[in-house]
Amino acid sequence: MSRSIFDEIKDLVTEASNDKTKEIDVKSTLEIVKLINAEDKTVADTVAEELPYIAQAVDLIVQSLRDGGRLFYIGAGTSGRLGVLDASECPPTYGTDPSLVQGIIAGGREALVRSQEGAEDSAENGARDLRETGFTAKDIVCGIAASRRTPYVVGAVEYARSIGAKTLYVTCNPRSEMHIAVDVAICAVVGPEVVMGSTRMKAGTATKLILNMLTTATMIKLGKVYGNMMVDLRMTSKKLVERSKRTVMMVTGLSYDDAAAVLEKAEGHVKTAIVMSLAGVDQAAAKAALAQHDGFVRFAIDSLKE
């Protein structure tokens, strides 16, 4: 078994040795960080090559969520942690229910703070953990595995596909080696790491950029952004309370006190406050217009003005 795994991973790009850093162990501190920085600079351009696939993935996520489904990230190690992180940021930023975007990591919650590397080796556990969320054909899963081969992730994705759900995959190995059947594969080949096999580095950075795009673009397409401002955020901290007021002020031109007043009338809902102010209507009319236009502030205001 060990030999077969060795043969499986020895030729992976993410396990290769980086010729540019083979003498990094004898470099000065400044030279070390310069080498790391130089490699990091290549990541964004590599991700840019995958933008058409990222856009396809966003469209599939949007369709699933509009049809009543949920988005699940699933991964192990760094990949799993990045998925959980991205999912956890959606409720405070976009006012989503915590169940709408979820992250699953091999080894469970403990793996978020303490490595559980052996947890990635079971395909059956990946399928089980996804199934235990109540995952259905309406939902969509995004497997995350820099190496592509992680059994836990592959098992979950194969289970999702077996019940008719849409499937995505984020990896840092070439598309030509992507032999897992999915609807969209995103293959950001960032090349060998500064420290051989340390995929928390360039591969992790690429993954973070991709996940940021997936959820941010999805939320924009779902009407949770007006202009370039988040207008569905939840006022769950003092910072978010003040950000809500500032957003209303910037969009409407209201003073601080007037923005606070209209937010109070809108029961703290930024979208509703903006529509009330710019369309000159009460809370009920603003909420009705937003509901009619799928939560899009711009369309709600235009319809009320007409």
Image (cartoon, grey):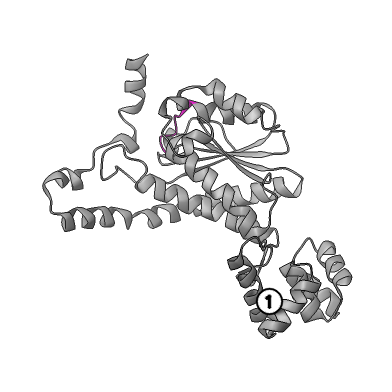
Q: Is residue 189 left or right of residue 219?
A: left
- At x 65%, y 59%, the residue is 94
Q: Is residue 161 visible?
A: no
Q: Is residue 46 shown above or below 229?
A: above
Q: Secondary structure at mark 1?
A: helix
71 part of magenta stretch: no
- At x 62%, y 57%, the residue is 92
Q: Is residue 306 left or right of residue 269?
A: right
- At x 65%, y 60%, the residue is 236
Residue 187 percent location from the top left of the image:
45, 43
Q: Quadrant of residue 37?
A: bottom left
Q: Quadrant of residue 69?
A: top right
Q: Is residue 282 left or right of residue 51?
A: right
- At x 78%, y 74%, the residue is 275
Q: Is residue 143 visible?
A: yes
Identify the magenta region: 146-151
Q: Amino acid at mark 1?
A: Val
Q: Quadrant of the C terminus?
A: bottom right
Pointer 1: residues within 10 angstroms few (<14), some, or many (20+)?
many
Q: Which residue is mark 1?
A: 248
Q: Specify the farthest residue to the top.
A: 1
Residue 212 percent location from the top left of the image:
52, 54
Q: Which secondary structure is most common in the magenta stretch? A: loop
Q: Is residue 103 left or right of residue 79?
A: right
**Front-most of 115 and 79?**
115
